[in-house]
């Protein structure tokens, strides 16, 4: 019996890096709402008392970046400097320039906005066709944020993290080995109360009882104290949680982040397309795992390569699957944008709790509407 462990983490919307992802994507949404063809590459840095926004934006519209930043921080819950940053008094600095004309000349004719490799992954081990560790890690921090924002636990502050380690047997989840949950809190609350409350209101609510046993380790605020958090405790930067955003460390990652990038940037659009294709491959029943890889050259529309890895689970030859994908899907930047309807202000919601595995309005890359076509082309009954 083959045993191995997979660990995935997630973070709350109040984590410094996630503040930055949300700022970048909220600015992107504000521009796309007024100018669907705006070019945006927006980076954010958050530190004590300051949000710094930089990048390249080309658009005919105007958006008030300081207003966007302050409204977002208020929505997250950062309205007191003691929590890490105060939306009402923090400095907001903007250093925006236009997109390079050298890049624009390739994008304007439908070419990719950059070179690179992008990956999409799907597995049949969960209904979402996602790896179980990242699914549970996201659910934990979403629940943590829910009980904070609804004042179920008034002592909670916005920053927080989760981590889940699962033991696999013969490529299937067998048990949860370790759960870590860290929550920023008011200084006057005891660690014992935090441990009791979060075990009851978060862990028990989210974690399937059948996956735990008497050897499962539960670590809540492992240092014993988490008062200093947010940008006061750690500098945040856009794009520093790429494994949280994707598959929790399962499969490959090309290295390019998503947040703050309009869909002409294939780092985003091709990663969404690769997930869409991988999910439809698995949903078709051809295999139980699939990783789709695409690569691009800057200014060139057609991908330089398309590959599929089914990890030995496929009923069809992988070369045949690639041929099917080339027939059924348009992997050019414009083709991906049109297929997934990506010129819409849908990106703020993607910036927290994962870009994949969420069958929500706007997340068109999670649809399984091509599964039957793939199955038919493969000749699988």
Image (cartoon, grey):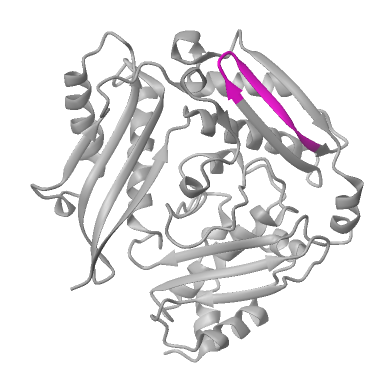
Q: Nearer the viewer, residue 340 or 228?
A: 228
Residue at image location 33% in from the left, 20% down from the top: 226
Q: Nearer the viewer, residue 144 or 228?
A: 228
Q: Nearer the viewer, residue 141 or 60?
A: 141
Residue at image location 15% in from the left, 54% down from the top: 210
Relative image position of residue 371 (x, y in whole percent): 50, 75
In the picture provided, is 286 more to the left or to the right than 39?
left
In the picture provided, is 299 more to the left or to the right than 151?
right
Residue at image location 48% in from the left, 19% down from the top: 77
Quadrant where the C terminus sits is: bottom left
Is residue 300 found inside the magenta-colored segment of the image? no
Relative image position of residue 324 (x, y in whole percent): 60, 83
- Whether residue 45 is visible here, answered yes or no, is yes
Relative image position of residue 318 (x, y in whole percent): 52, 84
Asked where in the image residue 326 lies, by quadrant, the reply is bottom right
Residue at image location 38% in from the left, 37% down from the top: 142
Q: Above or below — where is 121 with respect to 326?
A: above
Farthest residue toward the left?
214
Q: Above or below — where is 92 with respect to 266?
A: above
Relative image position of residue 250 (x, y in whole percent): 42, 59
Q: Above or below — where is 78 with respect to 160?
A: above
Q: Main secondary structure of the magenta part?
A: strand
Question: How many numbered marks have been drawn onto this rendered protein structure?
Answer: 0
In the picture provided, is 295 more to the left or to the right than 151?
right
Q: Which residues are magenta?
A: 46-56
Q: Above or below — where is 165 with respect to 235?
A: below
- Whether residue 64 is visible here, answered yes or no, is no
In the picture provided, is 198 more to the left or to the right than 233?
left
């Amino acid at each position: 019996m083959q045993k191995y462990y997979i660990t995935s983490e997630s973070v709350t919307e109040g984590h410094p890096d996630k503040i930055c992802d949300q700022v970048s994507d909220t600015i992107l949404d504000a521009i796309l709402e007024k100018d669907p063809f705006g070019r945006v590459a927006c980076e954010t840095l958050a530190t004590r008392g300051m949000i710094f926004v930089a990048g390249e934006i080309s658009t005919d519209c105007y958006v008030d970046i300081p207003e966007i930043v302050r409204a977002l921080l208020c929505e997250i819950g950062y309205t007191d400097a003691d929590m890490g940053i105060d939306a009402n008094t923090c400095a907001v600095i903007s250093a925006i320039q236009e997109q390079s004309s050298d890049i624009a000349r390739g994008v304007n004719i439908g070419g990719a906005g950059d070179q690179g490799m992008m990956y999409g992954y799907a597995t049949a081990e969960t209904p979402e066709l996602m790896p179980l560790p990242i699914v549970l890690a996201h659910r934990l921090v979403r629940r943590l944020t829910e009980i904070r924002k609804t004042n179920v636990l008034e002592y909670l502050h916005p920053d927080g993290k989760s981590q889940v380690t699962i033991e696999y047997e013969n490529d299937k989840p067998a048990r949860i080995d370790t759960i870590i949950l860290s929550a920023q809190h008011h200084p006057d609350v005891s660690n014992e109360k935090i441990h009791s409350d979060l075990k009851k209101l978060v862990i028990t609510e989210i974690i399937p009882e059948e996956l735990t046993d008497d050897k499962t380790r539960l670590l809540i605020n492992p240092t014993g104290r988490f008062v200093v958090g947010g940008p006061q405790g750690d500098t945040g930067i856009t794009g520093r949680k790429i494994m949280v955003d994707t598959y929790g460390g399962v499969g490959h990652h090309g290295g390019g982040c998503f947040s703050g990038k309009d869909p002409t940037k294939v780092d985003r659009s091709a990663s969404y397309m690769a997930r869409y294709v991988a999910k439809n491959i698995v949903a078709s029943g051809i295999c139980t795992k699939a990783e789709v890889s695409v690569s691009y050259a800057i200014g060139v529309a057609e991908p330089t390569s398309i590959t599929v890895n089914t990890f030995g689970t496929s009923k069809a030859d992988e070369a045949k699957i690639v041929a099917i994908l080339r027939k059924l899907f348009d992997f050019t930047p414009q083709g991906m944008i049109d297929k997934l309807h990506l010129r819409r202000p849908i990106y703020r919601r993607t910036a927290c709790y994962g870009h994949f595995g969420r069958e929500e309005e706007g997340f068109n890359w999670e649809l399984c509407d091509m599964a039957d076509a793939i199955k038919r082309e493969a000749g699988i009954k």
